[in-house]
Image (cartoon, coloured by chain):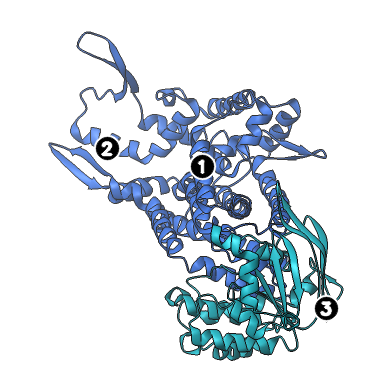
Amino acid sequence: MELVVDRLSKQYKNKIAVDRVSLRLQPGVYGLLGANGAGKTTLMRMICGILKPTSGTVSFDHKDVTTEEYRAELGYLPQDFGYYPEFTGQDFLLYMAALKGLSKPYAKRKVKELLELVALQDVAKKKIKTYSGGMKQRLGVAQVLLNEPKLLVLDEPTAGLDPKERVRFRNLIAELGKENIVLLSTHIVSDIEHIADKVLLMKDGQLIYQGKWEEQNGDLEEFYLKQFGEESRNE
Amino acid sequence: MNNFGILYTYELKKVCMRKIVWITMSILVLTAVYMGIADPLTTAYTYADGEERVQISGFEFLAMEKENAEALNGQAIDDALLEEVKDAYQGIHTVEYSSEDGTVMGTSLTLDYKDEEEEIRKARSQKREQYKEIYSYVKMVMGDYEAINTINEELLYQTRLGRVQDNWLEQKLTEEEKSYWTEKENTIDKPFVYGYAEGWKRILEEFLSLNIMLFLAIAICLSNIFSDEHLRKTDQLILCSRYGKKTLFFSKMAAGVTIGAVCSVLLLLPAIFSTLCVYGAGGYGVAVQVYLPICSWNLTMGQAALLMSLVYVAAGIFGSVLVMFLSEAMKNSVAVMGLMTGSVIATMLVSVPYRFRVISQIYELLPTVLLRVWQLWDDRLVSVFGVHFTNFQIAPIIYMTISAALIFYGNRIYKNYQIRGR
C-alpha cells in the first residue's frame, strides 16, 4: 500500500502554492505541519483529487487520483465544510455512504456502528442544525470512516473538539494508522508528537523536512516555532 | 450497483425538505385552482326586468349562458342555422355616440324595437340569448357587429378562409408552407358543427399564466440544487467520494427533471379540474375552428388542450434542466432566480415582428413564449430533412435536444470544478 506524490505543484497566477512536492507514504500516521498559507490544504486537496495540480501526479497503489477506484479508497475530512441542516445525522451518513458506494444494508449497519463510535447515537435522528460545533466535527469524522478508507486525509480533525474528545480521536487516528495511510494536518504540535510516525514540514509550498521525529534531537514544538517563528509573529 | 436510486431519492428529499418549496407550490396550486373559477366568482350581472333592475351572480349568469349554448350543440353552422340567428338579431345595428360638442366618441350596438309590446320585446331578447354564441362567432369571423344581417354560409366560410390567408401573408409564409396548410384546410370538415367547449377554450387561454407560474416554481425549487453544494462547502466531500462526480450529477439531474415534471402536472391538473368543474367538460370533440376560427389544424378543442399540455410538461422538463445547468454554471441560486424571473418578464413584454422571420420564429419557440393560445395559428413551419413540423411539434424535440446538450456540458463543468481558496 503506497501513496505516491510525484513533483506535485500548484501555481496561481503569480503565486506558487505547492512547489514540486514528492512523497512516498506507506501505512502510518503522517503529521503535516506548516504555518497558515504554507500550502498544506492545497496539497491535501490535490491528494484528494478536488484540485487539479499545475504539474505532477498523485497515485495510490497505481490508481490515478482522477479515477473512481482511487476515490473508493479515500476518506477526506476538510478543515471547513458544511452539512445539510435539514438532514438528521443518520440521514447525512446514509447519504455519504451511498456516495461512497456502500450497499444499503451494509450502510445501515456501518452508520449505526460509527454513530456509536463518535458518541452521536442518541442524537442520530435529530436534525444537524441542532448539533453543536463539536458534534458536527464528530459527524465529519464518522463520514470519513464509512468506506473503511485505506487513505485518510484529515485537515485539522481535532478542531472544535473538547480536550477529552481530542484525546479519544487522537487514539482513534493512531489506531487507524496501523493499517492505513493517515495524512494529518494540524496546528497542534502535541497531537503530531503523540500520534505521528513521521513529520512533514511545509514552508512556502515546499517540504522542508520529512522523516521520523525521533531521529532528531530536541523538541518538535521548539523546532516548529523556530522555523515558523517569523510567520507566527507576522500573523 | 452505483447507488443511483438511493442518491436520486436523497436529492428529491433535499428539494422537498425546503420550506420555500412547499410555500411556493401551495400558493401556485391555489392560484391555478382560482384561475378556473375567477371569472364567475368575481363578476355579477345586472339587467332590467320590466321596471326592476335585477342582479345575478357570475355563476348564475354562466349557468344561463351554458344552458343556451348547449341547446345549440350538434348544430352545423350552415345556412339554416344562420337564418335562425339572422331572424333573432333582425334590425341590429351600430350607432355612433357623440360628446356634447358633437365629437364622435364611438359606436354602440342597438336594436330597433319600434312600437313592440313588452312581451314581444322580451321574447325577442330571449331568442337572441339562445343564439348568442353563433352571433358572436359570425361577428368574430366577419369582424363586424352588423354582419349577421347579410350573412350566409358561403360568405362566412369564404371570409374565414380569407382571414386564414391574410394570416399566412402576415406571417410571410413560403409557397411550400401555404400548400402544406391548404392541404390541412381541406381535411377540416365544413360546415363546422357547433358545440359548447368553453371549458376547453378557457384551458387553452390559461396556459399563458400557467407557464409563468411553472417557470417561477422551477426557478425557486431547483435554483440551488448545485449552487448550495458550493455555498455550504459540501462540494469537497461529494467530489472526492466514489460516486460524487458522475453518478451524483446524473442523480441530481434526474431528481430535478422529476421535480420539473411534477411541478407542471401539479399546476396543470388543478387548473384543468377547476375550469372543467365550472364550465363543464363538454365539447372535447368540437372542432378547434369553432372557437379559434383562423386555426388551420385539424384538431378538436380537447386535442388542442392535450397537445398544449404535453408541450407544457416538456417545457417543464426543459426549464428544470436549464435551471440546474445555470445553478452549476453560476453557483449562485439568487442569480439563477433573478435570471429566470427576468427572462419570463422580458418574454411577456417583448415581441419580434414577423418580418424578421428567423429570429421571430426562434423567439416564438422559447418555452415562455410558445404556450400561448394564438400560437395555434402561427403557421410558420420548420423543415427538417424535408419533413415539415409546426412550432408545437418541433418544440419538444428542440427542448429535449438542448436539454441533452446542457446535461452534457453541465457535467463537464461539474466534474472539473476545482476547490480553491476558502
Indicate which disc residue A2 carries: 3
Percent of width and height locating residue B85: 41, 33
**Residue receiving disc 1:** B344
What kind of element bears circle 2? helix
Percent of width and height locating residue B373: 53, 41
Percent of width and height locating residue A141: 59, 80
What color does chain B have in the rendering? blue
Q: Residue furthest top?
A: B101
Identify the image quadrant of the C terminus of chain B. bottom right
Q: Residues within 10 Å of mark 2 (few under 14, many from 20)?
A: few
**Residue receiving disc 2:** B123
- In screen coordinates, is B30 left or right of B239? left
Q: Residue furthest left?
A: B51
Identify the image quadrant of the N terminus of chain B. bottom right
- In screen coordinates, is A66 left or right of A228? right
Real-space CA distance between mark 3 and mark 1, rounded to the nearest whole angstrom: 55 Å
What color does chain A have in the rendering? cyan
